[in-house]
Each structure stands twice: as C-alpha cells, then as structure tokens.
Image (cartoon, rainbow, N blue to C red):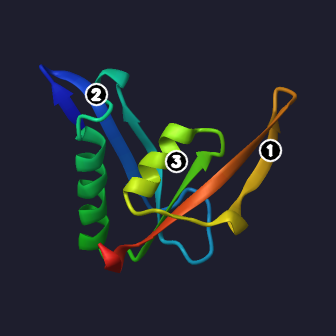
C-alpha cells in the first residue's frame, strides 16, 4: 500500500490464485492507483515489491486478468514486463453487454 499524508493512494493485492489456472501459482487480484498518482512511480514500486514478495515465497509464475478495453491497465502490465497471452482471453456477458478479459503473465525467475 502506498500512502501520502496518511491517505491510501495506491495498493496491490496478490497471492495464490482464487481460481485454478493451469501452469500459474500466483495472481494479481487487484492493483489501484488514484488518478492523481498516475505516472508517479507508485504503481511500479508496488508491483516490484509484489514480485519480490512472490519470488521470496517461491512462487514461479504470475498472471493477471484485465479487461480488453482497459488500455491504461494493459499498457501498465506491458511496461511491468507482462506477456500478453491471447489464448487465455475469455468473453462474458454482464448486464446485456459482452466483455473480454485478457491475461498477462510473468515468469518470476526472469525478474
């Protein structure tokens, strides 16, 4: 968690996957940054600390799902070294609309 003057401005939640994903032993559940802190380095710092935590606890392969149209999120994951795996894309319907979730992966030995 990143704070500024006692206010949470960014956070990351990760660990053992909530759903089984063959070949992966860890998942980013959520990462958030207040828009006022975009491009401040807070997200990268949290992501790097998350990778270090996972590696230190012998996790090997990380994944994160992201909505296909979330261009800001996708660019962030790509800057963090995530590899886009199109074969894991999944479409679903919500409230009469179709959404596609895409997957990014990290081989933790490479970091």
Badge number at residue 21: none
Packing grade of label 3 (10 A; few <14, some 14-19, many >=20) is: many
The image shows a total of numbered marks equal to 3
Q: Quadrant of the C terminus?
A: bottom left
Distance (Cα) linking label 2 and label 1:
31 Å
SS category of the residue bearing label 2: helix
Q: Quadrant of the N terminus?
A: top left
Q: Pick the residue in front: 87 or 20.
A: 87
> Dots 2 and 1: beta carbons under 8 Å?
no
Residue position for label 2: 37
Q: Position of residue 105 (x, y in %)?
A: 50, 66
Badge number at residue 92: 1
Q: Earlier in the sequence, mark 1 or mark 3?
A: 3
User: What residue is shown at x 71% (from left), y 68% (from top)?
Assistant: 87
Note whether 71 is above or below 36 in the view shown.
below
User: What residue is shown at x 53% (from left), y 72% (from top)?
Assistant: 24
Note whether 89 is above or below 70 in the view shown.
below
Residue position for label 3: 74
Q: Residue furthest right?
A: 96
Q: Earlier in the sequence, mark 2 or mark 1?
A: 2
SS category of the residue bearing label 1: strand
Q: Position of residue 88 (x, y in %)?
A: 69, 64
Q: Quadrant of residue 85?
A: bottom right
């Amino acid at each position: 968690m990143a704070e500024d003057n006692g206010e949470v401005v960014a956070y990351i939640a990760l660990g053992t996957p909530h759903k089984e994903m063959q070949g992966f032993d860890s998942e980013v559940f959520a990462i958030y940054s207040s828009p006022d802190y975009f491009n401040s380095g807070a997200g990268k710092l949290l992501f790097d600390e998350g990778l270090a935590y996972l590696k230190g606890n012998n996790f090997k392969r990380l994944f994160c799902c992201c909505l296909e149209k979330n261009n800001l999120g996708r660019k962030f994951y790509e800057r963090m070294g995530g590899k886009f795996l199109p074969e894991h894309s999944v479409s679903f319907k919500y409230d009469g609309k179709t959404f596609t979730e895409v997957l990014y992966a990290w081989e933790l030995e490479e970091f």
